[in-house]
Amino acid sequence: MEFIEVFSRILGSAVIFATPLIFTALGGVFSERSGVINIGLEGLMIMGAFVGIVFNLTFHTVFGAATPWISMLAAVIVSALFSLVHAAASITFRADQVVSGVAINFLALGIGLFLTKQWYDKGQTDFIKQPFYSSDVPVFNNIPIVGEMLFSGWYWTSYLAIAMAFAAWFVLYKTPFGLRLRSVGEHPMAADTNGIHVYRMRYIGVMISGALGGLGGSVYAMTVALNFSHGTILGQGFISLAAVIFGKWHPLGALGAAIFFGFAQSLSIVSSDIAFLEDVPSVFMLIAPYVLTILALAGFIGRAEAPKSLGEAYIKGNR
Amino acid sequence: MFSNRMINILIPVLSVILGLVAGAVIMLVFGYNPLDGFAALWKGAFGDSYFFGETIRQVTPYILSGLAVAFALRSGLLNIGVEGQVFVGWLASVWIGISFELPMVVHLPLAITAAAFAGAAWGFIPGLLKAKLGVHEVIVTIMMNYIALYVSNAVIRSLLTDGADRTESIAATASLKSEWLAEMTFYSRIHYGFIIAIAMAVVMWFILNRTTKGFELRAVGFNQHASNYAGMNVGRNIITAMVISGAFAGLAGAMEGLGTFGSMSIKSGFTNIGFDGIAVALLGANTAVGVVLAAFLFGILKIGALNMPTEAGVPTELVEIIIALIIFFVASSYMIRWVLLRFKKEGK
Amino acid sequence: GSSDSEESTGGDSGESSGNEESGGDGGSGDFSVAMVTDVGGVDDKSFNQSAWEGLQSFGEENGLSKGEGIDYAQSESDADYATNLNRLVRQDYNLIFGIGYLLQPAIKEVAGQYPDTSFALVDSVQEGDNIASIVFKEHQGSFLAGVAAAKKTQSNQIGFIGGVDGNLINKFEAGFVAGVKSVNADIDVEIEYAENFNDPEKGRALASNMYSKGVDVIYHASGGTGNGVFAEAKDLKNASPDEDVWVIGVDRDQYEEGQIGDANVTLTSMVKRVDIAVQDVSEQAMNGEFPGGEVIEYGLEDDAISIAETNEEAMTEEITSSVNEWKEKIINGDVEVPSTREELESFVDAL
Amino acid sequence: MEYVIEMLKIRKEFPGIVANDDITLRVQKGEIHALLGENGAGKSTLMNVLFGLYQPEQGEIKVRGAQVKITDPNTANAHGIGMVHQHFMLVDTFTVTENIILGSEPKKGGTVDIKKAEKQVAELSEQYGLNVDPSAKIRDISVGMQQRVEILKTLYRGADILIFDEPTAVLTPQEIKELIEIMNNLVKEGKSIILITHKLKEIMEVCDRCTVIRKGRGIGTVDVSETTPDQLAALMVGRDVSFSTEKTAAQPNEVYLSIKDLHVKDGRGVDMVKGLNLDVRSGEIVGIAGVDGNGQSELIEAVTGLRKSESGTIHLHEKVISNLTPRKVTQSGVSHIPQDRHKFGLVLDFPIGENMVLQTYYDEPFSKKGVMNFKNIYEKASDLIQEYDVRTPDAYTKARALSGGNQQKAIIGREVDRSPDLIIAAQPTRGLDVGAIEFIHKKLIEERDKGRAILLLSFELDEIMNVSDRIAVMFDGSIIREVAPEDTNEQELGLLMAGNTGQKAGGV
Ligand SMILES: Nc1ncnc2c1ncn2[C@@H]1O[C@H](COP(=O)(O)OP(=O)(O)OP(=O)(O)O)[C@@H](O)[C@H]1O
Ligand SMILES: Nc1ncnc2c1ncn2[C@@H]1O[C@H](COP(=O)(O)OP(=O)(O)OP(=O)(O)O)[C@@H](O)[C@H]1O
Ligand SMILES: [Mg+2]
Ligand SMILES: [Mg+2]
């Protein structure tokens, strides 16, 4: 059936688009649930993309086909460490969290481009030799309809992203760690009086966002951009931030929001094939994803409640 | 040793110094001569009156986009959509600039006002959605940025031109350019917009600190419940804040459209005037004076940086890092304050 | 070896020109020349880089080096063009190149202010006695790319992905479509614009949509957005190595980008040798023959526009001979390649 | 005698102030020990030191005779010390159980074993007679139940020394009664309790001994059985305080506020006020008595324009003020001392001076043609600060830096000064010390005597009985009975507040 083919095509490219956003938005959820605003998601993605590409270029002869995965891991670690800057500024030094996040964005881009210039003596790297490739999931891809839609031509990283969303939900809502992390974002003093280390939890929240933001950035770089330049990450971090809020600070909500964006994007591309949309000026197709998002928010998503103490530095002994 | 007042002044100054020192360290580590680097930066920004003029030219839109972000923040709203509001302001000013033949006294104010209105309209939408439906302004403004980008391109391509990449140049009667300023500065693109920017800083200060509307806006920014209790219309104030913020941003666009470029071309991405405005506002602690000073710092660094590769072989990217570090140090002023207070105690 | 000069991009070309000339004497007097990049930066693997390579070759022939007779200034935003041009004027460069059509307004302005300095604008036209406009007949190269695509396609469906819809890229589009239609008027050419030179995601989605509808050759003229086109093609190649998916690169030979294992998805590239033009105009200026006020068009006949044949496996004998045939016709003037959509329309009607 | 807690010569400084200066507190096993002092005397600080939230500059702490160093709440818990804080330490969006187990969760395979936890909570609450719903969200339950959750939190951690910081300030009389019973139960189980309260009656009723602190210094410890409320008050304040508010009989005049058949829904759309009728006349104070949650908040919000009324009318004089905006209501002559002073009453980040003109800033002389006149504003503010004895360094100090009592005095000054026809005072003395309460009651009566109509909402029966000229008992969204304070007593009011109109309790 043709519809299924078109749909699976839209879904396929929606998921490719959504995957890095899912990772990054999940990171945002952890950070913001712990009470730290993270406008620096963009910067964390940049750092992840940079590290992923550099690592991939440097070690592809050593690790062969495993290179992208190991590069991804490297990006996760470095970005998590990098996010410590945001954590230290906004948690320990009580910096305005928005300011600190903005600085992260500047810093990541500056460092990435500066080091690219230092190491490669040019403004952008070469193409990586070992990108991620999509593949079919054996056995499952033979299931009629569903097999074609969900198990053919996807990236493993996309499955990882979706699994990660459920894992994040599990961690946040089913484990002691999650309960504590959320309590710190809602009412840090209550958490403190219960013997929870507020600062430690917040550091962990921010570092998880660093790790996942780096993951998102590196996945993007190694599936779509294939190199690193000033234009590799352009706004995906902000879209991820939007997904965090759109998804009401819930991991599965963020997952849904990211996929929604993906759908809106790929619909706007596929729509040129749809007969009755053929004559619509292309600008309407270009802005459609963004307009749809606003309409969705205004129409039925509405008010979202942020974690209560989001954005407030916790000062021990203050009331 | 230090009074509190002095500490408040010292902190941003120290932050800038610390940022520059950190930049120097990075230069040393990578084998550049920091003295050469900073000398090149200084010369690039102030080397002669041309560069000074260019620095002012760069500072002008930064002041306005910084004011836009700051104004919204003072009312408790994070306007990430300044970028888009700059776009529509730029477009509107050029549109008026190329479409009419009018005497300058009418044409120029009309073009400037159109920019302010366009920016205001672009700010009105997220304001309205926030006020009436509680939709988070951050998402809506992010989305509005993209819409502004694509719509501006489409308008330039299909309404303002016949498929061209750039509009024609605006009529001289709508231009902010100044013959004598240009001549004085060896043809830098400094323009009268700078006066508008400074005037708007005064306007912002006046609105927020001297008018009843500003009193309401600040009250709403701090505590919506109490504002409502006190009889202020919270929703209307949210909209007002976004509209005024958008108007400032639109004016920043007019600076580019009527001053620096005199036209608008199809853009393949954001200009960053708006995003840099976030940093300018935050660096300037969301006050009018602070924004002006921070815009100067930004403008100097940005224009001066262009000179660093040619004169000292230092990559411009380093300046991004220095800017980021300065922002961090300002943001983490608690740390500096803490150290200063230490000194103060020991000094006793 | 100089036979692989077509292949050489990036840092290589410095070497190859080094081979040609090493013991050059510094007989350049005090002639100096510099260039201003557009926001792509001097190492954009595209026309900025190529221009700088041209200047470097010029420098090597005349004993000049960076900072000593030749130099570049990079722009971080559109607002920086005029500042940079001005800076170079004040550093007393005799000739200053503006690289990219984005610099046209700035060149116009600054050249007007400094009538004693010579300017050269690449990729666009600006009148002025002290301005030489350098343009390329990209439509010619694109035409040949279209011929190659038409010869290669098996599905009779071909795609074109442009960066931002505008005069410059329309030129590529028109030439390309004309080339395809000249070979086989029945071939469908699907045309899409990403509205961005830096959105690989969009490029990828557009390519994905095209390939999945049966398009098997895509010509991209979209800068960084093209990264996504390559990513999609390589991913398809990886999934089914026997299937034919091709990308045609732009500006320089994008063979490297197409490499996947032992296979390569880059059919060919429309190579635009900005370096040749830059070097040429610099030499003319040095010899006192600066073509001020003129529009100099570089095309197939100057080898400033060409079609890469690096992928020998893909560019079969048949394709290259056909490409060469058309190339002759164009150079001879037998074929007038259209450079706008209007011209294309009448061109196709005439077929 | 065996002491479970000895805090010896404790000193705690904050920047620019010594909050605790050489205070000694000894608590015996099995007693309820009161800690008494004015607002800002240093009681909470001392207890926060004991709970490990603050580190003292000097002094030592012994628990059951052994010297200890309490560095954080975890250590305090380990020593069996639990604290119910003045401002509740509960996460609104969590359930009762989640709040209780937070930080020491029962686990099953790495996950929180919420079933087991809920069972434990249910058992504990049974054991001590604390009635809570383990799976309810905190934001959906009453303040009284929230308090019991706080108590459960300490019990769950095995505390046998419990600190209660002003637990009764937010409770209704019924809830206070229940709390006292709970405390007695706890002591019976062998636990020791430190109780902070401003209500001397409660101290007299439940406490064994009482330590008094004044301005950060320990004044001494007395046996409650050997003292009187007057003596305690005098110790605390350092002068004699009168309790019963002196007032002459009311001289009610024409009806100012008239509410007819009013219906109001709450935020979730539940009917809270159901056909309420009430008149308030000039020159009288009408007190609304009732258990929290019977529609009082909605009633007041409807009258002041903060909430929409569904049907019915509210008249001020001849003018209908139902469903007007808060601004219009204010302009019609209504003043409102809000229940939650931090949320509604003040913009905490504004200087106290600017808070003084929060509703009048747009009027002359505070502004003219939209331009503020700060000179006039601060002149006015300084006058009010003086007149209402608001203790603040100056009018430029942020409202946040003032103590609760002084914030409240500032609000009252602002509201009364507008010379309104109607003053609505919602819990105007909540959390304040006796001195401040005395002052506020005096002010309200003064205003009444000037011919204003005053509507007083309070959960403190004492306050209702002492201040009101007429008591309207509110139950389930309407006024079920109006009585004169001299014709009733606490028992009868208690029954009425429980909705019991049938029998007339005890012949008075
Ligand atoms: N976090 C703090 N920072 C600075 N000073 C503080 C802080 N907490 C308390 N203080 C100071 O310590 C003094 C004692 O405050 P504390 O809260 O202990 O009073 P309290 O006796 O509990 O008053 P109340 O009866 O109103 O609860 C206050 O007057 C105040 O000046
Ligand atoms: N963050 C703070 N910084 C400085 N001083 C503070 C701070 N928090 C509280 N204080 C001081 O603590 C004192 C008592 O504050 P507290 O909130 O305990 O007052 P309160 O009368 O108990 O109010 P409430 O009725 O809200 O309990 C005040 O005098 C205030 O100056
Ligand atoms: Mg207290
Ligand atoms: Mg208190």
Image: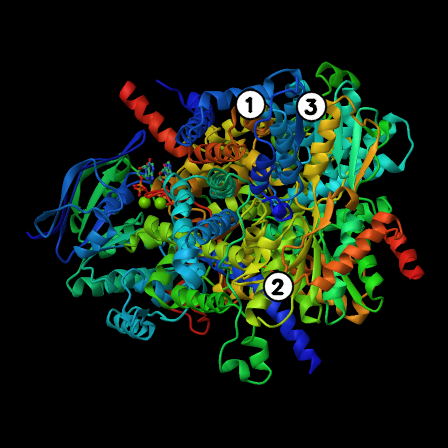
Q: Residue at x 70, y 37 (%)?
A: C276
- The residue identified by callout 3 is C86
- What amino acid is found at the position of numbered circle 2 in the picture? Ala
Direction left: furthest residue: D1
Placement of D500 over or under B329, stated as above or below: below
Q: Are marks 3 and 1 on the same chain?
A: no
The label nearer to you, 2 versus 3, is 2
| Left or right of A281 on screen, residue C19 | left
Q: Position of residue B58 (x, y in %)?
A: 65, 28
Q: Earlier in the sequence, mark 2 or mark 3?
A: 3
The label nearer to you, 1 versus 2, is 2
Asked whether residue A185 is in view, the answer is no
Question: For numbered disc 3, what is the local secondary structure?
Answer: helix
Quarter of the image with the C terminus of chain B in it: top left
The disc numbered 3 marks a residue on which chain?
A: C
- The residue identified by callout 1 is B311
Placement of D84 over or under A15, stated as above or below: above
Query: Within 10 Å of the Cα at label 1, are there few (<14), some (14-19), or many (20+) other Cα atoms?
Result: some
Asked whether residue C150 is in view, the answer is yes
Quarter of the image with the N terminus of chain B in it: top left
Of D435 and B193, the residue lying toward us:
B193
The disc numbered 2 marks a residue on which chain?
A: C
Q: Residue at x 41, y 46 (%)?
A: A82
Q: CA distance from mark 1 to mark 2?
A: 43 Å
Examine the image and state in which quarter residue C242 appears.
bottom right
The disc numbered 1 marks a residue on which chain?
A: B
Q: Position of residue B295 (x, y in %)?
A: 59, 29
